[in-house]
Every structure is written in C-alpha cells, then in structure tokens.
Image (tube, grey):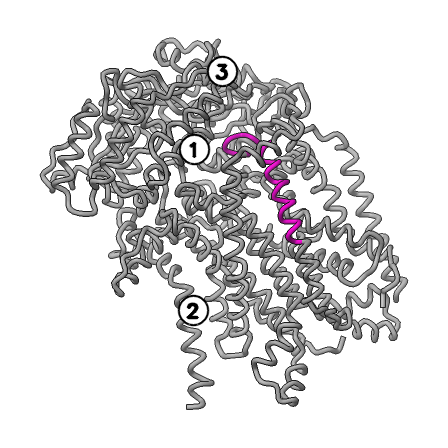
Amino acid sequence: MKKRYAKSWSLLTLALLLLLTACSGGNNNPPNNGGSTTPSTPNDNGGTSGGATELGIMWWGTDARHEATNNALNIYTSQNPNVTFKTEAMSWDAYWQKLPTLAASRTIPDVLQMDAAYLQEYVTRGQLADLTDIDLSGIVDDTVIENLKIDGKLYVIPLSQNAQGMAFNKEELEANGIPLPQPGWTYEEYFQWARDAKAKLPDGKYPIGDSGAWADYNNYQVGMGGEPIMADNGRTFNLDKDMFIEFYSTYAEFREQGIVPPADRSAAFQENDPQADPMASGVVMTRGATTGSVSALEQLMPGKIGVTTLPTGPAGGGWAQSTIFLAVNAATPNMDEAKTFVKWFITDKEAGKALGLTRGIPISAENYAELEPTLEAKDIIGKELYDLALEKAMPFFPVAAGYSEWADNYVKEMEAVSFGQQTIEQAYEKLNKAGMEIASRAG
Amino acid sequence: MKTFRSKVLPHILLIAFSLLMIYPVIWWVGASLKPAAELSLPTIWPSDPMWENYSNGWNYSNQHSFGRFFANTLLMELGNVVGGVITAALVAYGFGRLNFKLRGMWFAILLLTMMLPTQVTIVPQYILFNNFGFTDSYVPLVLPHFFGGGAFFIFLLVQFIRGLPRDLDEAAKIDGASVYGIFFRIILPLIKPALVTVGIFTFIWSWDDFFGQLLYLSSVSKFTVGLGLRMFIDQFDVQWGQLLAMSLLSVMPSALIFMFAQKYFVEGIATTGLKG
Amino acid sequence: MFKKENNLAGYIFISPWLIGFLLLTLWPITQSLYLSFTNYSMLDVGAPTWLGTDNYVKILTDDSTFTKSLTVTFLFVLVSVPLKLFFSLMVAMALVKSLRGMNVYRTAIYFPSLIGGSIAVAALWRNMFGADGYINHVLSWIGIEGTAWISNPDTALGTLILLNTWQFGSTMVIFLAGLKQIPGELYESASVDGAGRIRKFFSITLPMLSPVMFFNLVLGIIGSFQMFTAAFIITNGGPVNSTYMYALFLYEKAFKHYQMGYASALAWILLVIVALLTLINFVASRYWVFYESDGGKTK
C-alpha cells in the first residue's frame, strides 16, 4: 500500500517537473520589464506576412460605440481585404487601468484611442508614433492640428469636436424666477448671478458648485489674461498668487454664505451618478459640462437642462477642440498600414456613416453634414454647447507629463481648505512649491 | 414560556438580524427596477418597475448575451475550485503534518508572498504570462489555483490539520498506513468542512477578481460576468438600472452555492465521526 | 509520529505550491524588489534608472502622504480587525446551532460579504450614508441631525470600517467550520463535571478554536493592511485623504502617476511592517494557541 502510493506520486511529480522545466526552458530570458534598452517590438501583433496584416486596435466607450466601430472596421476590411483587425473594447476606467500594463509589457496594440488628459504622459515617454507626415489638409482645420502638436510634432489624429461649457437646471431656475445664465458671461457676472440666485432658491439648493479642480482655476487665470499654469510641455509652471487667492477667497466667502454647498456635501458629489451628481440630485443648479458629457446629464434629467458657456475673462473662457484621438503605437511593425487606417477612419464617407455620433461630433465637416438631420435631443444639446463655446474658446490645457500627481493633489489641497484644515495661502505655498519642482525637473 | 424562549425567540432574533444585514439588498432590488431619472429619489420601490432592465441588461451587448458571460465564468470557476481544493489540501498536509528540511523557511516564504501587495507584482506577472503566450485566455486566471490555491487557503487548511489529534494518525500507522494513506483516509475526510470552505471562498473571490480578468481577457467572447458588467459603465454614460439589475444577478450563483454547500461545511467532526 | 524527517514525502506534498512559487511568483517578486531601487514608470520605453536607496529614503523622510496613509491604515487595522473578529465569532456561535431554516439565515447574513467589491456597493453605501441617506433618516426620527458620513473627514474612515465589519461573512464562516470541528464529547463531559456555559466557552470553545482564531487574526491583519476596494470605489481616498489607505496610495503611485519604482518601494516597506507584526503574532501564539496535534501543550 505504502509503496504504491509513493511510487505513483513520485512519478506524477516527476512528470510535472519535466513539463514545467520544458515550459520554462524556452523562456529563460524573460525581458527585463523595461530593462532592455532597445524597444522590443510586440511579438503577437501578427506582423506582415504575405501581404496580410492584422492590426490590433483598442478603444474605450459604450456598447453603441463598440458596435459602430466594429461595423466601420468591417467596411475597411471589405475595402482593403489584406487588412483585418484584432479588436479590444472596454469602458473608460478599465481602459486606463489596463493600458499602463500593456505599455510596460510592450504589447500596446498598433492603433489605440487616446484622450487629451493622458496624451502627454504617453507621448513624452515615447509610446506613440509621430504622425506629422499624415496629410490632413481639407479634413481637419490647420489651427486644430497646430494646437495638438507637442514640441512641433503631431502624435494623434483628432476624431471629434468637443467643447467645455456649463449646464444649468432650466426647469428649476425658471420655477424660482431666476434669470437664466447668458452665454459669454464674465466671472464677475457669474459670481453676481450666484449671489442673486441664492436669495431666490429654497434652503438646501445652491446656485453654483464649489471649485476644487486645477483646470477650473486655470480657466480663470488664463481667462483673466494670465499665463497657463503648465506651459511649454510642463517645463514652465506658473501659479499666480494674487489671482489664486482672490479666486478662492470668493469661494470661501460663498461657502460661508451658503451660495456653494458646504464642504461635506461637495465632497460627496460624483458627476453622472444619478444619486450623487450635483445637478441630477437637484442640489446644485449649474455645473461644468462638455459636449461629450452633457448628453449623459440630459439623460438623467430629460428635458430639464439648458447650456451656456463657462464664465469668461477678457481673454476668453473654456475650450473647444478635439479631445478624443486615434494614436499609433511607436513600436508597431505595421506603421504604414496603421497610418493609412487612422486617416481613413476620419475621412471615409462610409465609415463616417457607420460611426455616426458615437464619438461625438465628427471632426470632418463633410461627414458631420451627412449626419446632422439624424441628431437626437441628447446630441443636439451637445452641439448647442459646442456652438456657444466656440466664440470665446481658449486652447485646451492638458495635464502636462509628470503633473498627474500634482493635479490630484490640487484637489486634495483645496478640499483641505474647504474643510477649514488649512488656509488658502498654505495651499498656495504647497502647490506652488510642488509645481516648481516638477517644472525644474522637466526642464 | 419555556418553548417560547427556546423555539420562537431565536427565530425572531435571527429574522431581525437577517433583515438588518440584508436591508441594502432590498434597496438594491428596488433600484434595479428604476429608470435612471428616478434613482435620485429616496423611495425604495419605483413607481413603475422596469422589469426590462433585466431583459435589456441580459442582452445589452449585441455580440454576446450575459448567458455567455455566465457560462464563461462558471467554466473558469470549475477549474479554480477543483484546482484550489485539491492542491491546497496536499500542500497543507505537507506543511501541517510532515517534517522535512527547510519546512519553516518555505512556510515563512509562503506567508510572505501574501504580504506583498499584488499591485507591484501584477505587471511582471503579466509580462511572464505574455511571454508564455497565455494572454487572452483563462490560463493565467486558472493556473495559479492549481499551484496550491493561494497562501490564504494553504494556511487555513494547515490550521485545521494542526487542530486534528495525532492519535488518529498513530492508530492508522499501527494499521500499516503510510503518510499518503493517512492523508487520504484520515485527514481528508476530517477536513471536509474546511475544504468546502476553501471551495466556496475560491468561487466567490475569483468571481470578484476584476483586475485579473481585465488584464488577461480581451475578446468579448471570453468575457466573464465581471467584465460584462463593466460594459454598462463608460466615462459619462452609465446604464444604471441595467447595471444594478445585472450585478444583482451576478451575485446569485455565489449566493446559491453558499446556501447549498453550507450543509457540508457545518457538518463537522460530530457527524462525520472519528472513525478515520 | 512523523517526528523524524520525511523529506521526499514532504516535498512531494508541497510541490504544487513550490513549483508555482518558483515558476510564477518568484520572478515578479524579485522584479518588484529590483524596481524599488530604480526610477521607473510603467510607460518608459528605456531601462529603469538605478537610484540606490533614494526611493526608500524619500518615503521614510520626506513624504507626508506616506505618513498620512500609513496612519490611516494603522487606525483602520487597529479598529476593524478586533471588531470584525469579535462580531463574527459571536454571530458564528449563534449560527452554529441546528435550527430549522438556519441555512436561509446564514445565507442572508453572509450576503453582504458576497457583494464584496461589486460596483453596486458604492451606490449602496452612498444611499445608506449620504447626507440624505437612510442612516440620517433613521437618526432624524430620534432627533439627531446626521452629517454626510462618507464625505466628512471625521466620519469617512468610520463608515469604511463599518462596511468592512458588515462584510464579516468570511471570517464568520471560518469560525463556523472551526466550531463544528470541536468534538461534542468535550462539552458532554464538561456538563457532567457541572460546568456552566461561560466556563465551557472559556475552557473548551476558546482553546479548541484558538488555531482558527489565530488564523483569522493573522489574515485579518494582513488583509486589512492591504484594504483597497472599498476605499477605491466608495471614497477614493477622500475627503482630504482621510481614507487614503496605503494600498490605494500605492496603486495610484503605480498606475495613475506612473511611478512604479516608488510604488514598489512602498510595497516592500509594507511587507516589512506586516511581516514584523506577523512574526510577533507567531511568537505570541505559543502562549495562547492550542494545537491538538501537539498533544495539547499550550506552554
């Protein structure tokens, strides 16, 4: 009995061991997780063999976008039978959780969707291919292209028009006899409107929300004629002390007077969550919105919302430009095919029809014209916001490479101010010091 | 009075406590039937229940229904549970009952592997599996379960095995049983409740392992329920009603398994007896 | 019995784990150790730059977020581990009895633990603990005006601890299995000796349950130090970092701020802390944990 067990076990283990050594034998030199100095090329991308190419492509979005994109890819394959696709589609959060891992293991797909918020980090570290030589004249406005360039090079193909503005609760403002916000309002008018509106609103309702994000303040600093906080690809940093203190003192005063919600209410807000969205929950009458996001709000409060611009200064307010792009992996073995494809993606008529408005207002005016008659209420409100924003729009200011942590800390420092844990000056000193340090390292 | 105290009172207390524990779930059921515009209201039940949240949610993706995702997940779970239970028992017996060179050191290492946050090992591990060519497959998700099922379960079983009296082994040894015989005939039957526990936890926890599934599965046809649920959420657009409906459904397999398996894990030594 | 060494059998039995360790775990672990001495972002195309101990020095001497998140985490562990242990043991004792419908009760009570990190939990918890949430409704009946529990820096950590305790099911199930393993004869003979319920609990239940208790304690500590999901999906570390758990800090460093080298150093520091605590636990266990297989010595 004893022997039989022992023998069978040993044999089993031996077999297992052999199998495993065989397995690992072929992989004695796993790449050094970034340890190799040459950018190794992804090995599972199919490559070009016998003229047939399989392009890996990855994007985030809703199911409607997935379906539309798959249809467009099928059209491409029918026009170019030698190119097929390996697709990967997921939600926004999942996408940005997964992409860094793919970058670390050099397995980013050939073509990938990019967002303005993340673009700089990926470009600066050499993950994305230079697409400057793709000719987009006649499809995309030259100024748009110039705006997108980083150190003189274009790394992304813009897909759609986006703009930043404000949404307001039309129904409730009207019910309380409050005049609706007018597009192009100045900061002064905005703050005064909030004071006046507060007097007419019932308890527990607030005309405007608190401000804590760096981009909010950046809009003010630049709108009032100052420098952008991060410029020159993150090499210069400019946080204007006087403007900073003036801006946040106004909010501190508003917090005291109940014009913006108390700190613990503000901290609980989660945009686009039906229970916790500042507007959808019925607590705040206005909030920032973009062409891309306002339709989600419209679905939560159907028929109740109106749109206007962000408050403006002498230099303007808000931005209007593309924020969703296609990019190409810098290490792709299928560079030419990928470049041809990304250009086709925004130009082709049939593709435009298949894609519809699933990535917002198409960048190609021609393709948009085709779609205009089919717009639904939720698309129209986005377009309305875009049209309003155009006049006063400033450039889009992304988080520069290396500043993502700074941008997160900004929110936290301002939160500490709103909870009374530190003064505005103290927050300024910390943020300014941290920002200067990053800039000096980037320089 | 006495029958009240012993027969009725425990039930009243248990029902009250169960309701307290499960209140949020009742809210969840109500919320899963609401249209998005009604979710911000404090009411528990919607004015007009949207049962179609369930049917639309089930067929949300036009490529595959949730039936496919459930089937995928269950199949993966089968591997996880079988692998985890068998190998954890083997390894735990080795650590808990046998004496071998460097046992202490290996056991310490086993525990240490649990203390390093996975966030920093997940990327190198991905690179490893990628080199093996195992991405977009269930292998990276299932294979680790065949290597002892994880330190948590090994340690758990070690504790249970160490809680068993050695006289049992002694008696069997006198009957001529080997270390292997004792494992199969004495230890295994006695730790059955703990093994069922391991099985249930493996099931529930791998159902929840979203990040691993996200990294390793990319084709929609291979999606698990957890990945399927993420399809309802995008940057701005969240299909709340359908999301809540499907995520409620998604915990049902675990709940059912728990309900039916528990009679095994609570059936302790008292009922299996000390026969060996 | 197998007091003498039995190397072959020992290694055969632990081989599944050992092979898995050597094959799948060892390299990632050494890799993370190596990276902790470098400046490395996951997006870097080039090689990581060697920094020596710079990351460690910066963390330990010049990183207020490290201090903050470590404090928050210690506080969390200190309160939630004993609370959960106590609570789950009490409930397990109540649920161990045979009673008609017990499986339904057990499932109902276990249910919160099933929903774990599901996205619905975040929505649910907000519904319970928000400014207009269920808890404040109940409090208003007795005339108390509650705060926005989740988004108030003074109470946010408390609600996470509560959530963690509410999901006590796994700990309870392990206790349940442990309780069922205690031979009934022990209680019978104690009854013959005239022992009351309290004495039985202290002289039979607790010692017999001590290996399982020890397990729950050690794993509770290890797990709580790595608590991530709830902080990630419900509070996102806020407000004002009041729930910025160590694991969340580490995750954001690695995946959001692209500082994998720094994050690895953070991970190894956590490993040392938790390993020390576990070691203390193992040493202390000699005085209170009772192993039947050691012939009942507790020293």
Between A291 and A435, the one lying in front of the other is: A435
| C287 to A361, vertically: above or below | below
Look at mark 2 in the image and give the residue it sits on. Answer: B18
Residue at the image position 42 percent from the left and 26 percent from the top: A117
Per the model, the C-alpha gap separating discs 1 and 3 is: 40 Å
| Residue type at numbered disc 3 | Thr
Q: Is residue B196 left or right of residue C76?
A: right
| B21 to A31, vertically: above or below | below
Q: Chain of mark 1?
A: A
Mark 1 or mark 3: which is in front? 1
Residue range in magenta is: C254-278
Look at mark 3 in the image and give the residue it sits on. Answer: A340
Mark sitting on residue A409: 1
Between B149 and A16, the one lying in front of the other is: B149
Residue C185, position as x, y percentages in the image: 67, 83
Query: Is disc 1 placed on a helix, strand or loop?
Result: helix
Q: Chain of mark 3?
A: A
Residue B190, image quadrant = bottom right
Q: Is residue A159 left or right of residue B165?
A: left
Residue at the image position 40 percent from the left and 27 percent from the top: A429
Q: Residue furthest right?
A: A3
Mark 1, residues whose alpha carbon is within 10 Å: few (<14), some, or many (≥20)? some
| Residue type at numbered disc 2 | Ser
